[in-house]
């Protein structure tokens, strides 16, 4: 959703702040009163009200601030009241339900402002609204509640997007009926208001009235909408701003939850509660499809039972889909209805969303809440298609069988909305076999027109000559090549697979551009062979090295679209730019449209999946997976060309057209934004001028007026070929309040923009308009058969279906192939929603406060050890962290650091000294002591045996410490082990050995390496997590040495940082500390 209405309070605050910066003296005094406001402390929160509290002669104005239209006529404005009267006025109305026209709602938010005494002749009307080409100012020299029809009365002044508002033009064009003494002041105000409007990305602003009193301008009543997609530009300027729900529509906590969920994912999750006790609930994938389902339910007379509107699209994760489905089911089962409820899980044919992955989330929700669904007698109807849909529908069937929930399941063989009459009990089930039924008879026209293969056949439909003209969107061919902006490897591979299927000589993707890495190549499949596609860091080089490129497919994020497209428009060879991203601010889109128009470049998008020309060229993910390309016969041209707003519905159109004609010649989704780069008319005229196209198809929608240009083109004969048209969004009229549908532009601003008005106008102009979307395919078939009967379109044999190798990754996901993995890992998994260590979620690691020792136990041992064990691991790391700068490892690290090496190199140089003579005693000590202890060897015999074998006892001996001067590290570790470990067999044996060795020399004590080693063996063996064999294997695998390496790394890094902090220079060993020997050895 793009344009959002803000509260009057916030709109006025923005105007006051930013007009003041332009030199205007603005009255910024206003207060927002909510049900939670404590009137006793109101003057503390709003100090400006203190004077009004002290002086009852100072007057105020109060009114609801909840997007209510015509408040004055509804008696909802308190005028000329003192503060006490304002409080009473609000108390009488707070939390009371009122009805305005057909809408009922509860008053809960009010705005309070100073009362500005003025005469009727001081009032004026001003409105600024955005248009495709720029902004338009409407002004009328009278204002107030009785201003009348300003669309008819007002003077108008338009400015192009690249044109500054001219104060002189404002004065001469708009203000001639304003007293001359006020003209200059008012002209400057309107000019600066226009600047603020643009700067803050408003898309609509109406002030009625604006008044002038004592040479000062006041805006008394304000209605405004802001382009929310511009938040990445204006968030700081907007500050805290509130976008309330339309008056009459209660804001549910579940809606807020889904909105928050939506903000945390790159996918789209939308939910609007229409009737919380309604019987018909929907969970629809895709913005366009969600409107189609709502329309169809309404068309069948069940609009009053439609409980919700919403969509999930853009490849949401399994977990996000689960949360979305769980929320819907919770709402659905909150109120009991003895008639039962209907849950329609619908959607078009997805372009790139993995249906099985999203269905896994849905199935989890259905399984978890199966008892609630059964208790409420919920009937479930599923229709879905797209990547991996077969697996998704099979999983749904398994869910139905395991839960015994009443679920009917359909695939692309069934019309997208055919499940609606079936769910509503208006159609017989036997007419719609489920996806796995043997009764399926796929209806596909078995022929393709000869004119699409061999040139024009038949007579034109109209005797009126058609004059071809230059079109900004090029007519794609099998030679068309493009640059893809962004590292979209999956999309590029899909384009190349389509190319290969269509038997193109060269890949349609010539190069990729990715600004965040240097030039390189990426490997892709071309059939079974591999090709390299160059990746450039900048557009200039990519374009210069590929002079045959004419198209740019832009996958840049909404933040980068403007800069990347602006750069692309500098290169004359680029004739078409497709902008995939959603959420591009309208102001930027309109500027890009103007720049492209000036340069003769066509833009498809923003917010589009792209377009497809069967047999020639595919933009990005258009057409979906290869199985859908084959099913919809998009590998060869048909005779029908279509244009749609919705990307998801364009794929559905491919399916519908294929099943009701000889297929698609070309199809484009122009994008769901209010001001797409190219319009319906641009493409329909291009199709009309192409002799190979015999039929035109239009799928419009509520919002905007572009469809009326098509009406005029039909009436004038400019469009001479049969046009089958339908505008989705007919359900909007049944809602008592404003509903923003899935696309940013799908919102009617007036009666002309409603879907019903557009459908009526198209039918009147001569287009073929069905009664509803369910009959859309039938109408296409009817026109197609008529053209065949008249000989205008002569069918030809169907060419052989091409074959394309399937990617191994996708084939494996479908369960078609298997292959042993090159790597096996059992300690961590980053594939799901959350990182896991040995099966434990990272969130649980922190919730249970496992610490470093707990994480190490999971990653090293795949066990969750007791707290005393993980604490002991942390103690080892602490006592082994460092032993001063003189030891070999620290010395090496310091020397490297002083030689200017980086941290990693310096650390490694220190670590490489760890071995038998430095740090490596731990493993050997553990092996020696545990082996002797296990075999029952006495301490004295052990020492004697080691002496006879001429072996050192690892872990025994210290340079300066003794029994009388113990090493505190050893004491800490030893005492902790004796106090906390269930068994200390090996430690006790080592202490017995110490008693023997110290009799020979006092410093032959159990040192820190030996103490750590024997205690660690005891820990592993006695903690209950391992068998003796498993514990010994861990020791033999080097985990003790690993603890020393891990601990000592902390010290080595410390030494590196210390040397850098002290800015020590290159180390050179002093010559006096070296014995130079030149004689014979």
Image (cartoon, rainbow, N blue to C red):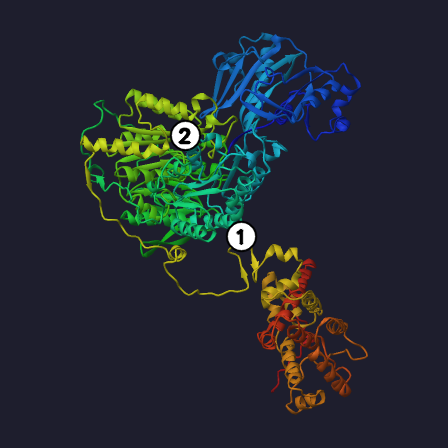
Q: Can the viewer see residue 575 in this picture?
A: no
Residue 878 numbered mark, or none: none
Q: x, y percentage for residue 226?
A: 55, 29
Please name the residue shown 28% across and 35% down the image: 640
Q: Can the viewer see residue 377 in this picture?
A: yes
Element type where label 2 sits in the image: helix
Q: Is residue 108 left or right of residue 549?
A: right
Element type where label 1 sits in the image: loop
* Nearest the eye: 988 or 318: 318
Q: Name the residue under label 1.
A: 833
Quarter of the figure that contains the C terminus: bottom right
Q: x, y percentage for residue 56?
A: 77, 16
Please name the residue shown 53% across and 15% down the image: 139
Residue sitting at the far front: 338
* Residue 287 sits above or below residue 523 on the image: above
Residue 299 numbered mark, or none: 2
Q: Give the Cα distance between marks 1 and 2.
A: 40 Å
Local crowd size for mark 2, using a 10 Å CA cut-off: few (<14), some (14–19), many (≥20): some
Q: x, y percentage for residue 436?
A: 35, 49
Q: Mark 1 or mark 2: which comes first in sequence? A: 2
**Res 179 → quadrant:** top right
**Badge 1 vs badge 2, beta-carbon distance below 8 Å:** no
* Nearest the eye: 81 or 442: 442
């Amino acid at each position: 959703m793009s344009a959002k209405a803000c509260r009057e309070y916030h709109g006025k605050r923005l105007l006051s702040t930013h007009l003041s910066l332009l030199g205007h003296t603005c009255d910024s005094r206003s207060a927002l009163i909510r049900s939670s406001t404590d009137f006793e402390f109101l003057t503390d929160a709003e100090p400006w009200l203190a004077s009004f509290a002290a002086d009852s002669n100072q007057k105020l104005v109060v009114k609801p601030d909840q997007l209510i239209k015509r408040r004055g006529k509804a008696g909802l404005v308190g005028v000329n009241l003192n503060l006490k009267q304002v409080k009473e006025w609000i108390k009488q109305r707070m939390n009371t339900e009122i009805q305005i026209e057909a809408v009922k709602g509860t008053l809960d938010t009010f705005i309070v402002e100073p009362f500005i005494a003025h005469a009727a002749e001081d009032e004026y009307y001003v409105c600024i609204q955005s248009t495709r080409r720029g902004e338009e100012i409407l002004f009328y020299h009278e204002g107030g509640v009785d201003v009348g029809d300003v669309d008819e009365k007002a003077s108008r002044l338009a400015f192009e997007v690249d044109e500054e508002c001219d104060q002189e033009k404002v004065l001469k064009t708009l203000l001639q009926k304003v007293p001359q003494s006020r003209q200059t002041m008012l002209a400057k105000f309107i000019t600066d208001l226009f600047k603020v409007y643009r700067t803050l990305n408003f898309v609509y602003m109406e002030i009625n009235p604006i008044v002038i009193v004592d040479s000062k301008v006041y805006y008394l009543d304000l209605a405004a909408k802001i382009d929310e997609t511009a938040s990445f530009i204006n968030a700081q300027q907007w500050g805290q701003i509130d976008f309330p729900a339309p008056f009459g529509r209660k804001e549910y906590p579940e809606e807020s939850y889904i909105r928050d969920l939506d903000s945390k994912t790159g996918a789209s999750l939308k939910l609007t509660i229409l009737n919380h006790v309604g019987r018909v609930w929907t969970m629809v994938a895709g913005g366009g499809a969600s409107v189609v389902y709502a329309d169809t339910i309404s068309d069948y007379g069940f609009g009053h039972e439609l409980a919700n509107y919403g969509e999930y699209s853009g490849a949401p994760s399994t977990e996000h889909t689960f949360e979305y489905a769980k929320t819907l089911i919770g709402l659905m089962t909150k109120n009991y209805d003895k008639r039962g409820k209907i849950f329609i899980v619908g959607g078009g044919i997805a372009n790139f969303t993995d249906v099985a992955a999203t269905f896994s989330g849905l199935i989890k929700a259905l399984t978890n809440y199966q008892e609630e669904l059964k208790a409420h007698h919920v009937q479930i109807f599923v229709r879905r298609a797209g990547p991996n849909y077969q697996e998704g529908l099979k999983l749904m069937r398994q869910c139905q069988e395991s839960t015994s929930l009443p679920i009917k399941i359909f695939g692309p063989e069934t019309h997208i909305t055919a499940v609606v009459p079936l769910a509503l009990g208006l159609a017989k089930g036997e007419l719609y076999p489920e996806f796995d039924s043997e009764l399926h008879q796929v209806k596909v026209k078995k022929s393709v027109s000869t004119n699409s293969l061999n040139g024009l056949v038949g007579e034109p439909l109209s005797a009126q000559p058609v004059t071809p003209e230059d079109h900004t969107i090029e007519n794609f061919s099998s030679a068309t090549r493009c640059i893809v902006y962004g590292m979209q490897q999956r999309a590029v591979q899909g384009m190349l697979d389509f190319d290969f299927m269509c038997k193109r000589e060269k890949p349609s993707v010539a190069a990729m551009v990715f600004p965040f890495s240097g030039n390189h190549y990426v490997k892709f499949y071309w059939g079974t062979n591999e090709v390299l596609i160059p990746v450039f860091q900048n557009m200039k080089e990519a374009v210069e090295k590929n002079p045959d490129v004419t198209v740019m497919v832009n996958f840049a994020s909404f933040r980068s679209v403007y800069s990347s497209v602006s750069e692309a428009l500098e290169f004359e060879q680029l004739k078409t730019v497709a902008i995939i991203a959603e959420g591009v601010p309208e102001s930027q889109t309109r500027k890009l449209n103007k720049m492209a128009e000036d340069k003769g470049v066509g833009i498809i998008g923003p917010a589009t999946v792209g377009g497809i020309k069967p047999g020639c060229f595919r933009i990005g993910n258009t057409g979906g997976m290869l199985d859908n390309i084959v099913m919809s016969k998009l590998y060869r041209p048909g005779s029908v060309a279509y244009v749609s707003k919705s990307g998801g519905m364009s794929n559905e159109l491919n399916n519908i057209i294929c099943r009701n004609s000889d297929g698609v010649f070309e199809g484009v989704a122009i994008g769901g934004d209010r001001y797409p780069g190219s319009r319906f008319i641009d493409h329909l005229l291009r199709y009309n001028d192409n002799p190979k196209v015999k039929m035109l198809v239009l799928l419009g929608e509520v919002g905007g007026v572009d469809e009326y240009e098509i009406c005029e083109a039909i009436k004038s004969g400019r469009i001479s070929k049969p046009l089958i048209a339908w505008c989705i969004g007919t359900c909007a009229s049944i809602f008592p309040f404003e509903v923003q549908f899935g696309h940013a532009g799908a919102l009617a601003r007036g009666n002309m923009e409603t879907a019903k008005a557009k459908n009526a106008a198209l039918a009147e102009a001569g287009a073929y308009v069905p009664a509803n979307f369910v009959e859309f395919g039938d109408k296409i078939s009817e026109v197609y058969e008529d053209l065949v009967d008249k000989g205008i379109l002569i069918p030809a044999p169907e060419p052989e279906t091409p074959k394309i190798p399937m990617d191994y990754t996708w084939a494996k996901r479908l369960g078609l192939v298997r292959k042993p993995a090159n790597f096996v890992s059992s300690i961590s998994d980053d594939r799901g929603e959350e990182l896991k260590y040995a099966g434990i979620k990272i969130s649980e690691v922190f919730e249970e406060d496992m610490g470093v020792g707990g994480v190490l136990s999971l990653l090293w041992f795949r066990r969750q050890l007791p707290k005393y064990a993980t604490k002991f691991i942390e103690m080892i790391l602490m006592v082994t962290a460092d032993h001063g700068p003189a030891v070999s490892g620290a010395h090496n690290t310091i020397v490297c650091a002083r030689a200017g090496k980086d941290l990693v190199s310096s650390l490694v140089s220190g670590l490489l000294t760890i071995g038998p003579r430095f740090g490596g005693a731990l493993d050997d000590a553990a092996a020696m002591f545990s082996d002797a202890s296990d075999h029952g060897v006495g301490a004295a015999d052990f020492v004697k045996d080691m002496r006879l074998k001429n072996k050192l006892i690892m872990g025994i001996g210290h340079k300066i410490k003794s029994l009388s001067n113990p090493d505190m590290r050893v004491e800490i570790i030893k005492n902790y082990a004796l106090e906390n470990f269930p068994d200390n067999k090996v430690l006790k044996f080592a202490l017995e050995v110490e008693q023997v060795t110290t009799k020979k020399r006092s410093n032959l004590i159990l040192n820190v390496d030996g103490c750590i080693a024997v205690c660690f063996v005891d820990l592993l063996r006695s903690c209950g997590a391992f068998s003796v064999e498993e514990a010994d294997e861990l020791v033999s695998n080097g985990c003790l040495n690993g603890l020393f390496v891990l601990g000592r790394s902390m010290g080595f890094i410390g030494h590196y940082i210390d040397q850098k902090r002290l800015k020590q220079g290159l180390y050179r060993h002093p010559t006096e500390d070296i014995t130079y020997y030149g004689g014979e050895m």
